[in-house]
């Protein structure tokens, strides 16, 4: 039977030593309970507005049964993503059965944006735990709040994507990208298609840039039918991760659409992702440099598609910095020359300040490009590459038509 933890005052009254981290732990648990309550309210409101189904799905029934068997907070599947290690669970008293039921509930369509957020967090927890077990380095440091995992994944200077088996009715590997003939992997077998399950902003920008050719359309949403050849040789998860060089992908949108593209990853880390019961989920891909063979454009996190001619050299950087200093001096001199009580309202001063801002933005872009493309491919994922336990024999097949 579960008993509530006595307060710090009662522990001191009994003469029991009090952990100095107890107040912070209690506050984190209270915050998790409040977040679970908010998710429950939104889920209940969405369920009440939707028409009642004729038969409740098995996943929802299992999740409701598991949540009602134990009176421990939080008891909601939405607050317990699957795959969370013991240090990252929102509630340490939750059982493995409750976590598995939460995974089943999160895998469903969910009520709108709430379901997508829960599903994305659940998949991210799986990626985090598998990277920790297979490379010794998770996305989120040990002991950190699990609710910060999404922000940590977006703040990484690498692209993170999770691909799994294509849904029933989707096109096979031969239809990915509309090529028809199908790609061939290192073993000579037709490469299977995989569906995008999760992508952080960097990975979404890279994939969208390849599919849209740099045009409009924006980044792909989680759950879109973006297909690419699976990187693993078979469906059996390996014990460790695999590092590969110059991997060429054929991408397609909408399951067999001919609006696909190609992407060449200079340095790739492939990590098998499994559920807590060791059933395979898919493969997580980490990379920090890519190329677009169609026009030779380069990509880095934050700069998904840049022509080589746009990369600044040392002379351009110095010239941009000098231009900013000259314009700043001109703005100061103009203000003194005008001698107005409020020079910022003068049209000439405002025009000079606008030009100064434009030059500053150009300098900032040049500095960002120099910092992003000044690093060698693989530097961003080096901490995870250091923990790889396996590498493909003979390396990845060289991309056709590239040096």
Image (spheres, helix red, strand yellow):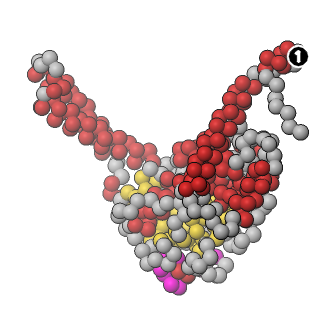
Q: Residues within 10 Å of mark 1 (few under 14, many from 20)?
A: few
Decide: is 188 above or below 158.
below
Magenta span: 176-186
**138 and 65: which one is in front?**
65
User: Which part of the image, by quadrant, shows the N terminus?
Assistant: top right
Residue 78: percent from left, percent from top: 66, 50
Residue visible at 48% across and 76% down?
177
Name the magenta segment's main secondary structure. loop
**Pointer 1: what residue?**
14
Is 183 a magenta residue? Answer: yes
Residue 377: percent from left, percent from top: 52, 55
Q: Is residue 277 left or right of residue 55?
A: right
Quadrant position of residue 191: bottom right
Residue 262: percent from left, percent from top: 47, 70
Q: Is residue 266 left or right of residue 29?
A: left
Q: Is residue 325 left or right of residue 43?
A: left
């Amino acid at each position: 039977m579960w008993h509530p933890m006595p307060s710090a005052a009662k522990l001191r009254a009994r003469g029991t030593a009090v952990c100095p981290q107890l107040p912070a732990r209690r506050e984190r648990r209270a915050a998790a309970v409040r977040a679970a309550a908010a998710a429950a309210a939104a889920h209940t409101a969405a369920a009440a507005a939707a028409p009642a189904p004729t038969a409740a799905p098995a996943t929802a029934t299992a999740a409701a049964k598991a949540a009602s068997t134990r009176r421990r907070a939080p008891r909601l599947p939405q607050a317990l993503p699957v795959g969370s290690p013991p240090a990252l669970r929102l509630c340490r008293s939750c059982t493995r059965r409750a976590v598995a039921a939460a995974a089943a509930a999160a895998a469903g369509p969910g009520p709108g944006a709430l379901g997508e957020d829960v599903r994305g967090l659940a998949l991210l927890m799986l990626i985090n735990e598998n990277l920790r077990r297979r490379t010794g380095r998770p996305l989120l440091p040990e002991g950190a709040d699990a609710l910060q995992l999404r922000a940590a994944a977006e703040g990484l200077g690498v692209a993170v994507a999770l691909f799994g088996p294509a849904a029933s009715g989707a096109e096979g590997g031969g239809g990915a990208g509309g090529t028809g003939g199908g790609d061939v992997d290192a073993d000579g077998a037709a490469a299977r298609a995989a569906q995008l399950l999760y992508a952080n902003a960097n990975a979404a920008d890279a994939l969208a840039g390849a599919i849209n050719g740099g045009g409009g359309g924006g980044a792909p949403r989680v759950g879109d039918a973006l297909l690419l050849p699976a990187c693993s040789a078979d469906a059996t998860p390996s014990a460790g991760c695999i590092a590969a060089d110059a991997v060429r992908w054929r991408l397609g949108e909408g399951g067999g659409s001919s609006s696909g593209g190609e992407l060449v990853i200079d340095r790739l880390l492939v990590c098998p992702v499994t559920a807590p019961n060791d059933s395979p989920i898919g493969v997580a891909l980490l990379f920090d440099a890519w190329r677009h063979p169609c026009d030779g454009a380069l990509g880095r996190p934050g700069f998904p598609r840049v022509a080589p001619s746009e990369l600044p050299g040392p002379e351009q950087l110095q010239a941009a910095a000098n231009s900013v200093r000259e314009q700043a001096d001109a703005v100061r001199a103009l203000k003194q020359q005008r001698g107005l009580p409020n020079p910022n309202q003068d049209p000439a001063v405002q025009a000079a300040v606008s030009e100064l801002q434009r030059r500053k933005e150009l300098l900032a872009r040049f500095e960002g490009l120099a910092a992003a493309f000044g690093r060698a491919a693989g530097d961003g994922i080096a901490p995870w590459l250091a923990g790889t336990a396996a590498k493909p024999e003979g390396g990845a097949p060289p991309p056709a038509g590239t040096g």
